[in-house]
Image: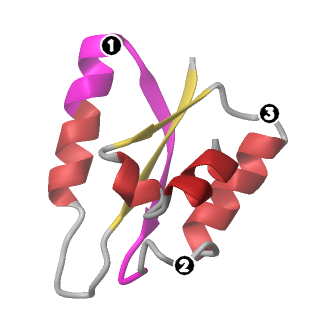
Amino acid sequence: MKTAAYVRVSTAEQNTELQHRGIERFCAHAGLDVVAWYVDEAQSGRLKSRPELDRLMEVARARQLECVIVWKFDRLARSASHLIRAV
């Protein structure tokens, strides 16, 4: 299954290592192969438009992916309405 991973941190002082490791462990257990990583650093979850999220959504809309993995829903969207629109 063509799988992409999306990770995001809100500030430049944070790093994405915890999210990367968690996603890698889950995918190994589930037998998923991550073909692309989309990483937004120092990007607020309140923003509906983020560089890598926008790129991921473009690829997903073109049906070039079958699955998108995030460490936690709040990495993708901070509001229920934004999460619903993204899904």
- Residue that appears at 46% across and 56% down: 76
The mark nearer the N terminus, 3 or 2, is 2
Q: Quadrant of residue 43?
A: bottom left
Mark 2 surroundings within 10 Å by alpha-carbon count, few (fewer than 14), some (14 through 19), many (20 or more): few
- Where in the figure is residue 62, as x and y percent of width and height? 84, 41
Q: Residue at x 68, y 51 (%)?
A: 85
**Between marks 1 and 2, how big is the CA–CA gap?**
31 Å
Residue pushed farthest bottom?
Answer: 12
Magenta span covers which residues? Answer: 25-43
* Residue carrying label 3: 63
Q: CA distance from mark 3 to mark 2?
A: 24 Å
Q: Amino acid at mark 1?
A: Ala
Residue tagged 1: 30
Point 27% across, 20% down: residue: 28
Q: Residue at x 30, y 44 (%)?
A: 71
Q: Secondary structure at mark 1?
A: helix
Determine which residue is flagged by label 2.
47
Mark 1 or mark 3, which is nearer the start of the sequence?
Answer: 1
